[in-house]
Structure formats: structure tokens, C-alpha cells
Amino acid sequence: MVKDIYIGCFKKFLVIEGRARRREFWIFLLVNVILGLIPVIGWVVAIATCIPSFTVAVRRLHDINKSGKYMFLMLIPFGVALVLMIGFIASMGNGGALIVILILILIASLAPAVILLIWAAKEGTHGKNDYGPDPKAGSKSTSKASTKSTSKARSKSKK
């Protein structure tokens, strides 16, 4: 199951339409974190999963009926990190006040990441939303359909 979900994210690595269940998003993230802890392989995984991670996150936002454009909030921490590195280099030897300000900016810049993680943990919209049908409903309806067809076949065989 984990393997199928993980590989499925790679198969849909350019698909930003539709919705992703929490299970798909969190399994993909968890496996990437675990693989990222392995030296050398971690860099390869980080590079290889860049686009699939972005697209599964966009589909996850779609599941809670939010635009994938919110993923651009993640650019804030990266931009701030760049500014902080430049600021840190510039502040060397100038005292600690600038470093304290830079640390506070860093903490504030993490807010978008926290918001996106909270949204990723939310339950998806029930039923169809602006981004497509409920992925859970699809699995329930197919299981109901297969149950109905199985029960019909049993009743026919009894007759």
C-alpha cells in the first residue's frame, strides 16, 4: 500500500489537477523524510522528489478546496533564508542586535510553512468541490458497486 501510494505520486508528478487524500500526501512526505535521512541518498531523493512533492501538495490543497497558488507561500521562507544569510554575513563583527532581528525574521517566515502543514492535516471537502470529485467517495463507490455485483451474482447462483 505505501509503495503503491509512493509510486503513484511519481506517476502523477506533473498532475496538478484533481485532489489528493491526506494519506497520499503524508505517506509521500514521510517516506521522503525517512529516505532523506540516509547520507548521499538524501540529496538524490530531495532533487528527485522536488516536483512530485510540489504537485501532491497542490492536489492536497485542492482536496480542502484551496487554490494550489498557496504553495507559493513556501517561497517566503526560502527568500527570507537568503536574506538572512546575506544579513548574517554583513553583521559579522557588528554586534548581536542584527543577529537577534534576523532570528526573529526567520521565525516569522516559518508561519506559511506551519499554515500549509495545518491545512494538509485537515480533512478534505466531502463530495465534489471546485477541484474535482471526492477521492474518498470514488473508493467507497467502487467498493459499494463491487459489493452489489457480488451480492447479485450470489443471488443468481442461488436461483
Image (spheres, rainbow, N blue to C red):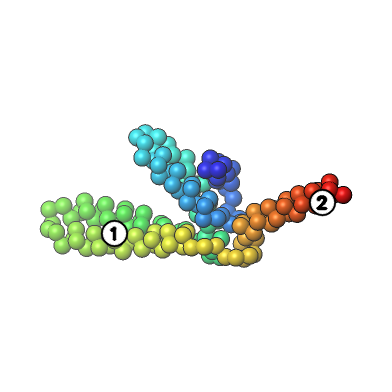
Q: Name the residue under label 1.
A: 106
Q: Which of 66 and 122 is in front in this view?
A: 122
Q: Where is residue 9 in the image (x, y as percent from the top left)?
A: 55, 45
Residue 39, relative to residue 67: is it above or below?
above
Q: Can residue 29 be seen in this view?
A: yes
Front label number (2 vs 1): 2
Q: In which quarter of the image is the N terminus?
A: top right
Q: 80 or 63, which lies in front? A: 63
- Rendering quarter of residue 102: bottom left
Q: Which residue is drawn at 22% across and 63% down?
A: 101
Tell me which amino acid carries mark 1. Answer: Leu
User: N-terminal of the two: label 2 or label 1?
Assistant: 1
Residue 43 appears in the picture as rendered: no
Where residue 44 appears, as percent x and y from the top left, is: 42, 36
**Residue at left offset 38%, top offset 61%:** 114
Q: Which numbered dot is residue 155? A: 2
Residue 72 location in percent, x, y?
46, 59
What amino acid does circle 2 point to? Answer: Ser
Q: Nearer the viewer, residue 31 or 55?
A: 31
